[in-house]
Amino acid sequence: MIKRKVVSIFIIFIAFLLQTTLCQSMALANVVPNLLLVVTICYGYLRGRTSGILIGFFCGLLLDMVYGSVIGLYAFVFMTIGFVIGFCQKIYFTDSLILPSILIVAGDFLYGIYYFVTEFLMRGRIHFGFYFLHVILPEMIYTALVGILVYRFLDMLERFLTSHREEAGL
């Protein structure tokens, strides 16, 4: 149990460091993949609602500290997405990538809508079509492509940690 928590914290920090450094230089169409959102969605899908909320909170809090204008907004939206995705754990299929891909796209879409409402709509900028075509859609595609790789890695890691735990008799 402790190993899973330590590994989760390590994965969050690695995703945060990659998103804030390396991914900034790999921007395509002026968007970068949202790795912390992918980590939140993957853990919510693999472990359930409670992990989705906790991982989402810490991922969002890291983003709030670096990019947020108000502490707690990113944490709230990531917690919400992690909680909603956590309901899908009951329909978990180990070999299919279809549902995780759909969940990553849907989560990134919700994140894009949230970001549009809080950063643009509240300031009177109502050009949603332009924002959708130039920001939300490219980020959804890029995040989904990177998210499939991250999901595969986290799925294998979870299977390893679970099988290792069962072998130890815990």
Image (cartoon, rainbow, N blue to C red):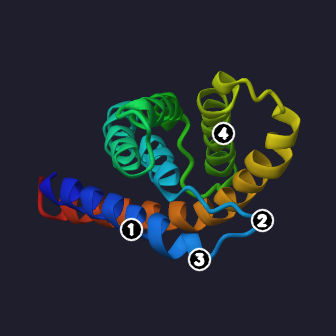
For the residue pair 49 and 57, the one nearer the viewer reads as: 57
The reply to whether discs 4 and 2 touch (Cβ–Cβ < 8 Å) is no
Graded by Cα atoms within 10 Å as few (under 14), some (14 to 19) or many (20 or more), the crowding at tag 3 reads few
Provide the residue designation for mark 4.
112
Q: In the image, what residue occupies the spot 50% across and 45% down?
A: 41
4 or 3: tag closer to the N-terminus: 3
Q: Amino acid at mark 1?
A: Leu
1 or 3: tag closer to the N-terminus: 1
Graded by Cα atoms within 10 Å as few (under 14), some (14 to 19) or many (20 or more), the crowding at tag 1 reads some
Q: Amino acid at mark 4?
A: Gly
**Residue 16: x %, y % from top left:** 40, 61
Q: Amino acid at mark 2?
A: Ala
Q: Amino acid at mark 3?
A: Ser
For the residue pair 126 and 159, the one nearer the viewer reads as: 126
Per the rendering, the mark at residue 25 is 3
Q: Secondary structure at mark 2?
A: loop
